[in-house]
Amino acid sequence: MSKGEPRPETPKHRNTETLRPMPKDFLQDVQDQYDVIVIGSGLAGLTTANVLARQGRSVLLLEQHYKLGGMATWFKRPGGHIFDISLHGFPYGMIKSCRRYWSREIADSIVPLRNIRFDNPMFSLTTEFHRDDFTRLLIERFQVEPQAVQKFFDAARHMNFYDDQQTTTRELFDRFFPGREDVIRLLMEPITYANGSTLEDPAISYGIVFSNFMSKGVFTFQGGTDKLIGLMQKELVASGVEVRIHCDVTKIDCRGGKVRGVEVNGRSIRTGVVVSNANLHATLFHLVGPDYFDRKFVEEARAVRLNNSSTQVYMALKPGETIDESTGDLLFSSTAPRFQTDLLLSRDITSRTYSFYYPRIRPEGRQRYLIVSSTNANFEDWAHLPQDQYETSKKDLVTTTLDALEKYVPNVRSRLAYVEAATPRTFQHYTRHVQGASFGTKFEGLAVSRALPEQLPGLYHAGSVGIIMSGWLGAMNYGVIVANEVDSHLLTESSGR
Ligand SMILES: Cc1cc2nc3c(=O)[nH]c(=O)nc-3n(C[C@H](O)[C@H](O)[C@H](O)COP(=O)(O)OP(=O)(O)OC[C@H]3O[C@@H](n4cnc5c(N)ncnc54)[C@H](O)[C@@H]3O)c2cc1C
């Protein structure tokens, strides 16, 4: 852990009765063989494990970190503050997925965010971020022809994965809103923030994600990520998944061209099926190794681009300090005169997205107000800084963020009890995501991820790839798809076909 990164919490199971630390066997009582081993407990890994165990498979879930959740995580700080990393907003579809593949209790904790704000040199507005409200805004505020608005929404909604992948998002916008940079900013800025996609990415990936949000707006999990992952952990146990943390898988054994098992904490465990929730590149090139795949496939896999990473600043208000809810739940702020995706990634930050956590959303006993500022970032801008420059840059990130936030939360500095920053290095450190990629890989990663079992029978990948299969909903749904494929594979194997 590099200095200044969030500190791990003290594990609850620490043995306090003996002074000499005993090496703990995190694989104690684990069997020698399972139907399926899932590597990683991100939302995709957790969901795959739960679905397969409910289908009657014996499942071992191995997580290298000391807690479950992957990027869906949180950390605690003195004063009882709990900060969420990636709980900023997801589409309505999460309710259905959680109800079907997890539990009613989880689904019932999902609530809408009503105040989504935009503030930039082109416009300032508040919206509920769904089709009706966007239609109203586009017609009344942006003076767009009603027919163009309707046709745009219909075109976006009817896009599906098998459609034309050549048209870019820029071309889609130009078709309906030629020359309207302000309209493009309204429609694109939140999605770019959400997953780093650009105007040059395929229009279908924009259309699918945008339409998911437009169906009913933006939602969050009441109670925070810690509550969600706690409930999921309870479900996994009820479904019969063997869950182990502190278990770093170092190798997927593929001798003879098929999956045979994994190596973890110095032990070999046998299985015919591995689902890796680790980063796609890490799965192929570190856990398996390129020699097990066709040369052409390896080239395709190497060409898969990683998504960008993020920086974040976490802030907690002093007891008794409040923020009016009209400040917004999510606030997309920018000082850039025009919308440009490269500006969103620049170290010279012009765009910040603030998430405000009110006591209603995160009830934790006493009234707490938290703010998380997020910015897309390039790993390379942070990766090689010497330690002193790294620390200075983090301090600078905090200072400039507080300066920017002053506009929305006056006197913020004197009202804060706690502030801390995270960088792409922090995300890489905790989730092992290559280059701290917040949303896995770009679009082309999906085809590579899907083709793995053809290359190596029994090897599957479920985790953030592309825009559609990433984020909380995308990762979870991809976990379900892969679980069903694994189940069919196991049925075929057992019937001897
Ligand atoms: C700053 C930030 C903000 C975000 N905001 C949002 C948002 O508002 N809405 C939204 O929908 N999404 C958001 N996301 C994205 C979302 O959190 C991710 O897309 C999603 O959680 C990824 O899930 P995943 O299943 O792909 O796996 P990950 O979360 O990447 O988890 C992979 C897991 O595998 C484990 N692992 C890796 N290698 C090994 C190994 N060798 N052995 C054992 N375990 C291993 C890791 O420790 C990790 O737990 C955000 C992400 C970030 C970083």
Image (tube, rainbow, N blue to C red):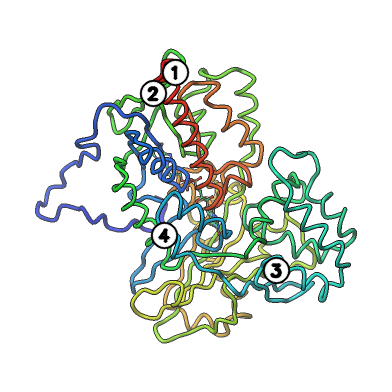
In the rendered picture of this protein, how many numbered marks are placed on residues? 4
Q: Circle 1: is it few (<14), some (14-19), or many (20+) Cα within 10 Å?
A: some
The answer to whether the beta carbon of the residue marked 1 is less than 8 Å from any atom of ligand 1 is no
For marks 1 and 2, give the CA distance.
8 Å
For marks 4 and 2, give the CA distance.
32 Å
| Residues marked 1 and 2 touching at CB (< 8 Å) | yes
For marks 3 and 2, give the CA distance.
50 Å
For marks 4 and 1, give the CA distance.
37 Å
Give x and y (percent) for residue 425. 50, 50
Instruction: Name the residue carrying label 4.
Output: 106
Instruction: Name the residue carrying label 2.
Output: 272
Q: Quadrant of residue 492?
A: top left
Instruction: Name the residue carrying label 1.
Output: 258
Left or right? Give the position of 187 relative to 458.
right
Give x and y (percent) for residue 29. 19, 36
Q: Circle 3: is it few (<14), some (14-19), or many (20+) Cα within 10 Å?
A: many
Q: Circle 2: is it few (<14), some (14-19), or many (20+) Cα within 10 Å?
A: many
Residue type, numbered disc 2: Gly
For marks 4 and 3, give the CA distance.
34 Å
Outermost bottom residue: 320
